[in-house]
Image (cartoon, helix red, strand yellow):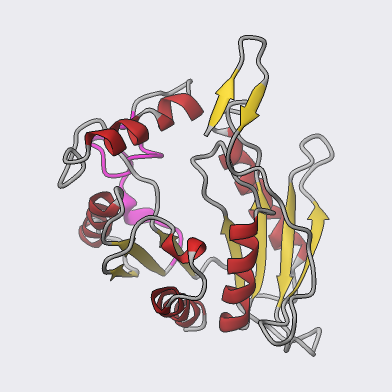
Amino acid sequence: YLRVYKDGRVERFRGTEVVPPSLDPQHTTGVLSKDIIMITPQTNVSARLYLPSNMTNSFQKLPLIIYFHGGRFCIESAFSPMSHHYLNMLVSKSNAIAVSINYRLAPEYPLPTAYDDSWAALQWVAEHFKGLVDMEIYGIALVQPYFWGEESIGSEAVDLERKANVECVWPFVCPSSPSNDDPRVNPMAVGAPSLSGLGCTKVLICVAEKDVFRDRNWLYYETLKKSGWKGIVEIVETEGEDHIFHLRNLSSEKTANLTNCLASFFNH
């Protein structure tokens, strides 16, 4: 994915391509996107805003999706082709506004920088969208989320190459707390804070059958259900697919099904 030189330079081999904001053609989604610089002048954390085509009333209240792109905290951006094209599709299907956050990446900015940037982005959104949306976090959609742990569970130990590829990520992006049982990457670990205080009323977890993170995603679902949290948690598994299949193949039926599931979640 990347190479770090002795002088501190970082060379990335993946996740560097970007696409500009645009008006997506009407025959596809008609979604309008534009880039915004936000948060504080010191960080220059930016975002891409997406507006659905049928947003004709400036006082119309729509669901607001705050999107955090994947990429192991060290590659990709809010402007990558995969995220951009998928968000056009998701915003159109959901009839929602989306803000895709371009947080800073490790190793130049090791964790918790991305978390700090993301929290600052939530505060920025709350301030700038006041009156347009009701600023309360109603739900969280976790789409094939990155959870791991020191001890293997389920099928994790079957593919040793994939296991080794994953277990080195957290120590690299978070050298100040390199254990894969850090509760930020393993919220199910012994001694991790209880999930009972999760600050929303509903959670949707989207799992892919062939994903290396599948068993951790299911464990998170079971742990949240048993935590005493008062909200509603659902889990949806897509059979026969691997990690981020929905970003790699926008035209597939399974991507459409997942997108429709997310759109329904955002609107109910």
**Image quadrant assignment for residue 151:** top left
Please state if 261 lies on the left or on the right of 24 as rendered.
left
Give the magenta part as a residue range. Answer: 180-200
**Image quadrant assignment for residue 16:** top right
Q: Is residue 233 above or below residue 26?
A: above
Please state if 260 lies on the left or on the right of 238 as rendered.
right
Please name the residue shown 70% across and 60% down the image: 125
Q: Is residue 69 above or below residue 263?
A: above
Q: Residue 231: where, in percent of width, then height?
A: 34, 69
- Compare residues 148 and 117 and report the one nearer the observer: 148
Q: Is residue 105 above or below residue 9?
A: below
Q: Residue 246: where, in percent of width, then height?
A: 46, 66
Which secondary structure class fits the magenta region best? loop
Q: Is residue 155 above or below residue 32?
A: above
Asked if residue 191 is among those painted magenta in the image, a careful observer would answer yes
Please name the residue shown 65% across and 15% down the image: 8
Please name the residue shown 21% across and 42% down the image: 156
- Compare residues 23 and 229 and report the one nearer the observer: 23
Does residue 174 show up?
no
Asked if residue 56 is among those painted magenta in the image, a careful observer would answer no
